């Protein structure tokens, strides 16, 4: 493809959605830019992202990336086995959580190059809101649904996380911090350093844990897009129907009972199934009868009912 450089002397300031690094894309760096397309006020910049060498399309508006689209024709890739092993062994042993995080610098560098581990990221309140909203804008409900479905037969638990984070993320409104602890989103008003590695570990281990935290919403959806949206199979649809049927018959029930109700339909560990139930709660598929629409408490021993019964 013939390279066309962006017009104008300013070119584009592009925030790498994964690393937070600001890439100032100028015409002298045109080898990274594959095309520029104007869409009304928006511009689409197609560029080769250097981290992980993923072909991504950045949707740029007023010099700020509003979303990423993965154009990789080869489809989603499996996580690199060595990087996944490094990520896992940094936090987990056969006895459970490690007391101290432990990873060799060269191993961390390798896992970072594969998009599974990250440097700590310091973001202001407004930067986090902007990036989380950009991550939400980069996916559609259909993408999220496909990823959830495709997780059922493959046990790719990281794909099912987005059903919860997208539900949370869609409610994030553009705003500046109100108060020391923001009264709008609950985030810190001051710049905050985020450890992304543990979030990535939880995502690959169980399908995420902190689905309502904005930094996890951001990371989860950015990673989903960066790795590509999977295509579910008829077997996934069959599994989903059986899973929802199992839940419907069990309700009203506690989370622990729901986990038992789906044991025949969802492969994997008990923790994976508990997380799946949490995800369905966050997405509003299963709801607390008296508190529909309110954020759900995880590991709560309350009785859940079927949202569709209303
Ligand atoms: Zn806020």
Image: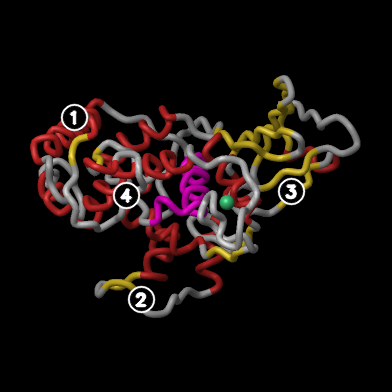
Looking at the rendered structure, the secondary structure element under dot 3 is strand
Kindly identify which residue carries mark 4: 296
Relative to 145, 70 lies left or right: right
Sequence-wise, the earlier of marks 2 and 1 is 2
Looking at the rendered structure, the secondary structure element under dot 2 is loop
Relative to 209, 107 lies left or right: right
Kindly identify which residue carries mark 3: 23
The circle drawn on residue 309 is 1
Mark 4 nearby-residue class (10 Å; few <14, some 14–19, many ≥20): some
Give the quarter of the image for residue 231.
Answer: top left
Q: Name the colour scheme.
A: secondary structure
Instruction: Report the quarter where the C terminus lies.
Output: top left
Q: Which residue is situated farthest in the right direction here?
A: 9
As rendered, which of 225 and 193 lies closer to the eye? 193
Secondary structure character of the magenta stretch overall: helix
Labels 3, 4: front one:
4
Kindly identify which residue carries mark 2: 98
Alpha-carbon span between mark 3 and mark 2: 36 Å
Sequence-wise, the earlier of marks 1 and 4 is 4
Give the quarter of the image for residue 229.
Answer: top left
């Amino acid at each position: 493809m013939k390279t066309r450089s962006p017009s104008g002397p300013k070119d584009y300031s592009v925030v790498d959605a994964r690393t937070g690094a600001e890439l100032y894309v100028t015409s002298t760096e045109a080898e990274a830019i594959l095309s520029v397309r104007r869409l009304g006020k928006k511009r689409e910049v197609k560029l080769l992202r250097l981290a992980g060498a993923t072909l991504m399309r950045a949707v740029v508006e007023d010099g700020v990336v509003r979303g990423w689209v993965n154009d990789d024709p080869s489809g989603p890739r499996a996580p690199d086995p060595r990087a996944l092993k490094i990520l896992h062994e940094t936090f987990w042993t056969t006895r459970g959580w490690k007391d101290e995080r432990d990873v060799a610098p060269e191993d961390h560098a390798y896992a970072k190059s594969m998009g599974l581990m990250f440097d700590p990221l310091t973001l202001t309140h407004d930067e986090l809101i902007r990036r989380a909203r950009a991550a939400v804008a980069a996916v559609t409900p259909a993408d999220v649904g496909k990823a959830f479905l495709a997780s059922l037969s493959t046990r790719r638990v990281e794909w099912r996380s987005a059903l919860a984070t997208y539900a949370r993320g869609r409610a994030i409104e553009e705003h500046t911090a109100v108060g020391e602890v923001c009264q709008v989103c609950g985030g810190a008003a001051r710049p905050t350093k985020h450890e992304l590695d543990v979030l990535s570990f939880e995502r690959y281990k169980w399908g995420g844990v902190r689905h309502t935290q904005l930094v996890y919403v951001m990371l989860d959806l950015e990673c989903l897009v960066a790795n590509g949206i999977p295509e579910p199979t008829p077997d996934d649809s069959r599994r989903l129907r059986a899973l929802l049927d199992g839940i419907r018959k069990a309700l009203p029930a506690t989370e622990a009972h729901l986990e038992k109700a789906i044991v025949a339909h969802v492969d994997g560990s008990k923790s994976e199934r508990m997380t799946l139930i949490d995800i369905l709660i966050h997405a509003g598929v299963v709801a607390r009868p008296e508190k529909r629409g309110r954020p759900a408490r995880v590991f709560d021993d309350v009785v859940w009912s079927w949202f569709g019964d209303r």
